[in-house]
Image: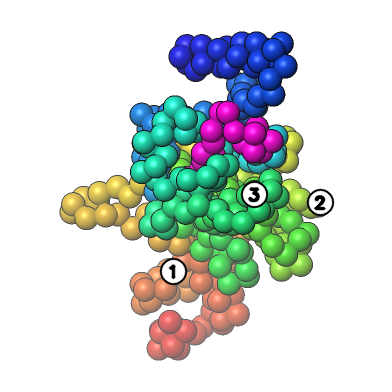
Amino acid sequence: HLGLCRVATLAMFLRLAASLCGVATSAVVIDAMKHDIQQIQAGSFDTIIGKFRDDAVSAVWYYKESNAADEKFLDEYQKVAKELKGIVKVCAMDCERFAKFCKDVGVGETPSVMIYPPNPQPSYALQGELTSKRITNVLTKSVPSMVTSLTADNEAAFLTSDPSKPKVILFSNKPKVPFMWRALSAEMVFKRTIKFGFATEEANAELAKKFKVKKFPTIVMQRGGKGEQKEMYSGDINFQAIHNWVNLYSESGMGDKVAGAAGGESGSDEAKPWLIQDIPELHHTTLQLTLLFLRLCPHRPCWQLASLDHLEAGISAHDLVNQC
């Protein structure tokens, strides 16, 4: 950091000296207090970008400090860094300082922006006009989605499988999963420890009623082995605020499969829809039938006992077996 500060100070001094002498000059100065762009060096590339290629999306602007075109591009690239702050790594490297590295990655003329999508997709130089809108669009499309779009058919399985993982659901009045929600679901820790769902006002009316959702958008979280803890998010609707809230319940190792007594993986990840269904009320007149049903039909889950309510008290064992 000290070396970068000295270089920046020297560049500013040279600019001032040149302007006093009436000589036109250009310089790219990335100020950590003013810009959201992360400066990297050849030696830190693997630490900041390379080692995270399996999970993260990154962009690197390769520039030459004395190039007028790069100086002009700085403000445009800053717009990208500001909009995607905390979501995508938006970096820059000076090719006058690290010429060999830039040559090795194929950088010729600058400004040059390279996109580093998650593996196994290869990195590539963005061709054509380099506008903030275009670069942002390319980067957001590169972010994968780990979101489950909920329907009446998969709601129960989503809520009851992987009981150690909190379930976070965005209830929306729009049909498409927003980028922010995709980005949260793909975050390198959350993708392993949290399950993200997306529900719409039109398609998931009953689920919205279950979670007492009355306005859209609304974000709710379900926690606990039986989904007994439910919490509604009340903070700002932006990536960092929601990330901070979800992160409170994202513990290292959460959701990992554990070994069973026989040494194999336990079946705790399997969906258990009866955990979120109402428990049937068993009347006194059906108690004996219930005990007999459990004895004769051990393969039927308990939540199906509700079907006994319509049976007569004098039903025979043969007829009861036919209900299995």
Do we see residue 287 in this rendering?
A: no
Compared with residue 258, is residue 278 higher up or lower down, i.e. above or below?
below
Q: Residue at x 44, y 27 (%)?
A: 97
Amino acid at pointer 2: Lys
From mark 2 to mark 3, how far is it between C-alphas? 39 Å
From mark 2 to mark 1, how far is it between C-alphas? 36 Å
Precedes in sequence: disc 2 or disc 3: 3
Say if mark 3 contacts mark 1, CB within 8 Å.
no
Q: Which residue is mark 3?
A: 130
Precedes in sequence: disc 2 or disc 1: 2
Q: Nearer the viewer, residue 261 or 241?
A: 241
Do we see residue 123 in this rendering?
A: yes
Q: Residue at x 41, y 56 (%)?
A: 122
Q: Is residue 127 left or right of residue 270?
A: right
Q: Which residue is mark 2?
A: 215
Amino acid at pointer 3: Leu
Most extreme residue toward the left is: 262
Precedes in sequence: disc 3 or disc 1: 3
Compared with residue 256, is residue 71 higher up or lower down, i.e. above or below?
above
Q: Position of residue 152 (x, y in %)?
A: 63, 70
Q: Position of residue 178 (x, y in %)?
A: 68, 54
Q: Residues within 10 Å of mark 3 (few under 14, many from 20)?
A: some
Q: Which residue is mark 1?
A: 301
Q: Quadrant of residue 277?
A: bottom right
Q: Magenta residues?
A: 56-74
Secondary structure found at label 3? loop
Amino acid at pointer 1: Pro
State which mark lies toward you, 2 or 1. 2
State which mark lies toward you, 3 or 1. 3
Q: Is residue 263 left or right of residue 323?
A: left
